[in-house]
């Protein structure tokens, strides 16, 4: 999963016009460490990650930032907030960890102030940070070191020569802060390098680290889609094609939402919102309708689908699967179209939601876990867990009988599409 995450980070950087290349970026990092930098160099290191920091100098009530000019203190301007690199409000725990934000206030801020010859003092319930105007670049340099590296001591930043496992460049940097946007399923992600030395991230280079760093906030990270009724549970969708980045545009969640809305409205049904269930269930139909025929068989795409949940600022990964059989799902989508299209998808979704709704409110996520695993097997292998289906069907029939209703179970033409398509491949 680490490679698709890296390719996503590269795609987002390209989309955001981050034009600097690895060798240029890493050379500037050298200047940052040895003190031969200019202001334009600091700007080059700050610009790609500026979205992680505040631009409003009054964003925190417990801290006041001042500039010392001609022996007097004045308020800091919006333009000068880039020198402070105050972590943005509302960052997730992962994003804070990625930039050292959790220790900013209690540790690294004070060190940066001292390095710049400034003052750090308290006034009632507020902490006042005062920085000499002619030392702003010194302060900024220290903040950039704090952000990119786990240590700011020069002797701990340079080590033996290694090769970055992502871009292949040779470098001697170590102690980088490395946190990918998702807790990937590797044994120890902080030791992800080509040698597996017992040293944190020793072989990833600063440039590739910056690419990951950019994607730890939601608007830059892999797209998220919530589950219905449990808003803190969601899926990440991470398209990947080693040869063609058009997959990101084809499988964009906004495009999927537009597709569902159009299909439902054509049937005079009301579309509410895209959720994880209707996205996953409609994926074959969406592929059938949207994958360009000229690309069928010429691109080898996949989609990583990750089930996660969040509690406050912590995130937990529960399960994942990888969709690779696009040609098979294209046939499934065609069959779904023949059997009733979007109506059959939503009828089957009702079956699954009836199952999930049997769980208590605080246990619904467990129902989604079971459902996610069931859908994953269908989308990856075309395998239908009939034991799971039987348990859903039995409960529904018993409920209908208890209420004295005629038993009608719809939506199973959706599954028929998978069974029929499997005969053709």
Image (tube, helix red, strand yellow):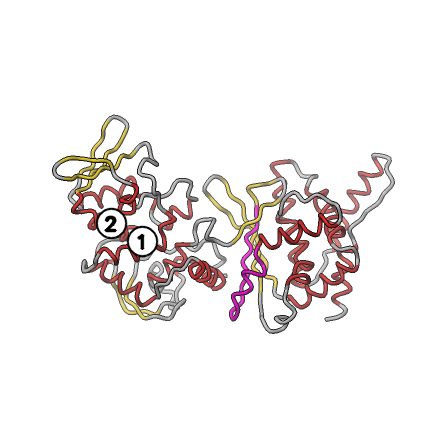
The part of the image, by quadrant, that contains residue 227 is top right
Q: Is there any visible trace of residue 188 in the rendered image?
A: no
Tell me if 79 is positioned left or right of 136 in this view. Answer: right
- Which one is nearer the viewer's eye here, 188 or 5? 5
Tell me if 225 is positioned left or right of 67 in this view. Answer: right
Q: Which residues are magenta?
A: 234-252
The answer to the question of whether label 1 and label 2 lie on touching residues, with beta carbons closer than 8 A, is: yes
Q: List x then y, in percent, for residue 152.
A: 24, 53
The part of the image, by quadrant, that contains residue 302 is bottom right
Tell me if 412 is positioned left or right of 175 in this view. Answer: right
Q: Is there any visible trace of residue 383 in the rendered image?
A: yes
- Which one is nearer the viewer's eye here, 318 or 100? 100
- Mark 1, residues whose alpha carbon is within 10 Å: few (<14), some, or many (≥20)? many
Identity of the residue furthest to the bottom in this view = 298
Q: Is residue 335 above or below residue 270?
A: below
- Mark 2, residues whose alpha carbon is within 10 Å: few (<14), some, or many (≥20)? many
Mark 1 highlights which residue? Answer: 46
> Does 235 lie within the magenta span?
yes
Q: List x then y, in percent, for residue 192.
A: 41, 62
Identify the residue at image location x=47%, y=49%: 218
Q: List x then y, in percent, for residue 284.
A: 68, 60
Chain-order first, disc 1 or disc 2 = 1
Residue 140, label in figure: 2
Spatial CA distance of label 1 from label 2 is: 9 Å
- Which one is nearer the viewer's eye here, 398 or 79? 79
Q: List x then y, in percent, for residue 143.
A: 27, 49
């Amino acid at each position: 999963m680490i490679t698709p995450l890296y390719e996503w980070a590269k795609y987002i950087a390209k989309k955001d016009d981050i034009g600097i290349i690895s060798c240029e970026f890493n050379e500037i990092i050298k200047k940052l460490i040895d003190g031969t930098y200019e202001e334009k160099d600091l700007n080059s290191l700050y610009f790609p990650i500026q979205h992680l920091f505040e631009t409003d100098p009054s964003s925190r009530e417990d801290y006041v930032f001042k500039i010392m000019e001609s022996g007097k203190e004045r308020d800091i301007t919006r333009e000068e907030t880039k020198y402070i690199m105050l972590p943005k409000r509302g960052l997730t725990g992962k994003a804070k960890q990625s930039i050292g934000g959790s220790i900013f206030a209690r540790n690294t801020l004070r060190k940066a102030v001292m390095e710049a010859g400034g003052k750090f003092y308290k006034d009632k319930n507020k902490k006042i940070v005062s920085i000499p105007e002619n030392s702003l670049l010194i302060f900024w340099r220290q903040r950039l070191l704090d952000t990119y590296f786990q240590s700011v001591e020069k002797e701990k930043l340079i080590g033996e020569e290694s090769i970055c496992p992502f871009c292949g460049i040779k470098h001697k940097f170590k102690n980088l802060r490395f946190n990918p946007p998702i807790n990937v399923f590797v044994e120890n992600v902080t030791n992800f390098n080509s040698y597996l030395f017992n040293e944190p991230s020793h072989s990833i280079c600063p440039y590739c680290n910056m690419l990951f760093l950019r994607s730890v906030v939601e608007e830059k990270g892999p797209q998220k889609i919530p589950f219905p009724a449990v808003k803190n549970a969601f899926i990440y969708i991470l398209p990947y094609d080693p040869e063609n980045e058009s997959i990101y545009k084809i499988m964009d969640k906004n495009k999927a939402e537009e597709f569902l809305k159009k299909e439902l409205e054509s049937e005079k049904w009301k579309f509410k919102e895209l959720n994880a269930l209707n996205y996953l269930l409609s994926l074959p139909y969406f592929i059938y309708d949207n994958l360009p025929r000229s690309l069928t068989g010429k691109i080898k795409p996949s989609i990583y689908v990750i089930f996660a949940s969040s509690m406050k600022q912590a995130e937990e990964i529960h399960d994942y699967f990888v969709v690779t059989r696009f040609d098979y799902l294209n046939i499934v989508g065609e069959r779904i179209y023949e059997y009733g299209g979007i109506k059959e998808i939503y009828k089957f979704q009702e079956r699954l939601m009836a199952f999930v709704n049997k769980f208590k409110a605080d246990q619904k996520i467990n129902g989604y876990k079971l459902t996610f695993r069931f859908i994953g097997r269908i989308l990856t292998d075309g395998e239908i867990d009939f034991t799971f289906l039987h348990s859903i069907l039995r409960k529904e029939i018993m409920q209908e009988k208890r209420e004295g209703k005629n038993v009608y179970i719809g939506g199973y033409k959706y599954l028929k599409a998978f069974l029929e398509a499997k005969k053709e491949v």
